[in-house]
Amino acid sequence: IYTSTIPPIGSIDAPFLVFTELPDAITGGSDFVLEVTAYDSNGVVLTSATGNATLSATGLTLSEGATTAPFENGRATFS
């Protein structure tokens, strides 16, 4: 699991995000799911988080359409 400290998202204070752990290897062109969960400073899922999570990468190609996902109940799911 990867954790990232982030600045506030709009008016939502989400001190950290947790990304689901990806497999050790992913074959190019194959599908996989990545979930991002927003937590408050007490480690509780921030179900009030709204808006979109956006992924970007350097040196990688991301499938078009899979780079933005809406937060629903504190989670954004990319697939």
Image (spheres, rainbow, N blue to C red):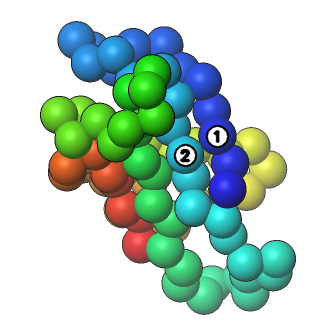
Image-based side of 33 in relation to 70, left or right: right
Percent across and percent down for residue 12 are 26, 18
Asked if residue 71 lies left or right of residue 5, the reply is left
Q: Is residue 51 visible?
A: no
Q: Residue at x 45, y 60 (%)?
A: 35
Residue for point 51% across, 65% down: 34
> Callout 2: 10 Å neighbours few (<14), some, many (20+)?
some
Q: Is residue 56 above or below residue 48?
A: below
Query: Tag 2's secondary structure?
Result: strand
Q: Which mark is residue 3?
A: 1
Mark before the other along the chain sequence, 2 or 1 = 1
| Pointers 2 and 1 in contact (C-beta within 8 Å) | yes
In the visual, does 18 lie left or right of 64?
right
The type of residue carrying mark 2 is Val
Rendered-image quadrant of the N terminus:
bottom right
- Residue nearer the viewer, 51 or 15: 15
Give the answer, above or below, for where 6 lies relative to 54.
Answer: above
> Which disc, if any, is residue 18?
2
Taking the spot 53% from the left edge, 84% from the top edge, the residue there is 31
Along the viewing direction, whichever of 65 and 19 lies nearer the viewer:
19
Q: Quadrant of residue 9?
A: top left
Q: Sort mark 1 into few (<14), some (14-19) or many (20+) by Cα contacts within 10 Å.
A: few
The secondary structure type at the circle numbered 1 is strand
Q: Is residue 27 above or below residue 75?
A: below
